[in-house]
Amino acid sequence: RYLPFRDNVFDKVISFETISLIVDGYEKVCEEISRITKKYVIFTALHKEYFYVFHDRKKSHIVASDEEEIKLLCKRAGLSIEFMKILTTRDTYKEGTVPYDMNIKDAIYVVARKFK
């Protein structure tokens, strides 16, 4: 929730597989990431459609989001989304590791630019 860096110190901040692990205060983490970047933030978030099929939402220590929640999260953190792609099981797993006809949304991949 606090990153020990000056404001606008990095050209890019990359966060894969981490934001979803912060249940209490992940909005603050996104604000901190925005605060320390000059230009871009690249991150992934776990997609609700995938996570809640396999896990109990009430007992989870993970935050899963959908596209609208990611848009709102970025807007509140002062970020403008330039690219967003939903990664599916077909993108992330080889045939045979999961039922290949499952087109479940695994993750949301986002490239956002800091507002000027």
Image: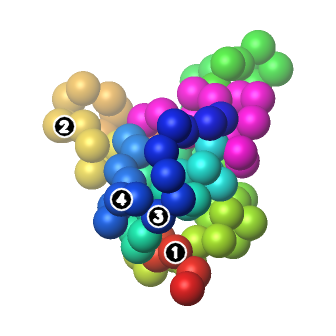
Residue at screen point 20% across, 29% down: 96
* Front label number (4 vs 1): 4
* The magenta stretch spans residue 88: no
Residue 111: x and y in percent read 41, 67
Amino acid type, label 4 = Phe
Labelled pair 1, 2 in contact (Cβ < 8 Å): no
Instruction: Tell me the CA gap for discs 4 and 2.
Output: 39 Å
Amino acid type, label 3 = Asn
Of all residues, the one furthest to the bottom in this rendering is 116
Residue at screen point 36% across, 59% down: 10
| Numbered disc 1: secondary structure | strand
Q: 25 and 32: which one is in front?
A: 32
Residue 72: x and y in percent read 73, 66
Instruction: Tell me the CA gap for discs 3 and 2.
Output: 43 Å
Instruction: Tell me the CA gap for discs 4 and 1.
Output: 12 Å
Residue 49: x and y in percent read 61, 44
Give the residue at mark 3: 8
Q: 29 and 68: which one is in front?
A: 29
- Alpha-carbon neighbours of circle 4 within 10 Å: few (<14), some, or many (≥20)? some
Residue at screen point 54% across, 38% down: 3
Residue at screen point 46% across, 75% down: 113
Give the residue at mark 2: 95
Amino acid type, label 1 = Lys
Of all residues, the one furthest to the right in this rendering is 58
| Numbered disc 3: secondary structure | loop
Amino acid type, label 2 = Glu
Reading the chain from its start, which is encountered first: label 4 or label 1? Answer: 4
Labelled pair 4, 2 in contact (Cβ < 8 Å): no
Give the residue at mark 1: 114
Give, as a single range, the part of the protein colored magenta. Answer: 17-28
